[in-house]
Amino acid sequence: MNHTAFRSIVAAGALTFSGLALNSIALATSSSDPDEVRNIKVTRVFTPKGLDSNDNSVVILDGYLPDGCYRLTKPEVHVSDEHKMITIQARANYFNVPCIEALVPYTQEVELGMLAGGHYRIQNTEGHQIGSLAVTKAQSKYPDDFLYAPVEDLVLDQKETTPGQHMATLRGRFTNSCMYIEHVDSKYFPDSVEILPIMAMHKGNCADVEVPFSVDVGLDSERLTPGRMLIHTRSLNGRSVSSILNVSPN
């Protein structure tokens, strides 16, 4: 089908794919130039807890694109350690084409690098505060307070196994046969849960070999806050791995 025919069908309000009529879906068009970069709003900023000055700090932006004509792109980020200020402006490419006129959810992790210790204000380019981030000044020359497991992925069980129960699964790869997870600590906050997989080493003959691991961590439903919560874990490579959990009201 050529573009002229497509526009004619859209104008007639009778677009159909595989027998499914979509004439009830509103399509948005605009006179703006295609591929224009526009600022977009951030509904909420999630900030991992327990970060210190030798960590690679991150924050997670959560919000909605105005409609289907927008595609998320790299945000504008400026950090001032001197003024304890982080300026983040979420942005998206706008395309001047017919598209679905409906809000599109987005979640975006923003890397900030190593920050000096302190309490940082997070604002957008208009100067409006959209969040805050606490970074503790490291008290040790070691990269972390604990030896964390090399976590690469965090998967949340959105299907509740029992009413109100959720599971977080940590996955990664050990690179030595003597590595193992000794225990897992979980810390609960009003808007987030921090999962700390503490690793240890067996004594004896060890071999350099990759060994995949997976550990399930049950989340305490009594300590979860209804709504969207950040679930994040620490990893041996110095990064945090995060996901967002939707918690239903009791």
Image (cartoon, rainbow, N blue to C red):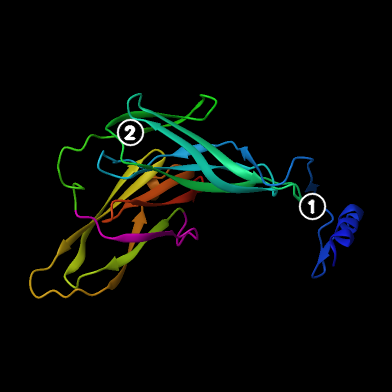
Q: Is residue 162 magenta?
A: yes
Q: Is residue 100 left or right of residue 45?
A: right
Relative image position of residue 37 (x, y in whole percent): 63, 41
Residue at (28% x, 44% y) in the render = 55
231 relative to 37, above or below: below
**Upstream in sequence: badge 2 or badge 1:** 1
Residue beneath disc 2:
134
Residue beneath disc 1:
25
- The disc placed on residue 160 is none
Image quadrant occupied by the N terminus: bottom right
Relative image position of residue 139 (x, y in whole percent): 16, 37
Q: Is residue 238 magenta?
A: no
Q: Is residue 122 visible?
A: yes
Relative image position of residue 214 (x, y in whole percent): 33, 67
**Which sits in the foreground, 140 or 167?**
140
- Which amino acid does the dot numbered 1 rest on? Ile
Q: CB atoms at circles 2 and 1 under 8 Å apart? A: no
Q: Is residue 217 left or right of residue 5?
A: left
Q: Nearer the viewer's eye, disc 2 or disc 1? A: 2
What secondary structure is marked by label 1? loop
What are the residue bounds of the magenta stretch?
147-163
Indicate the quadrant where residue 113 lies: top left
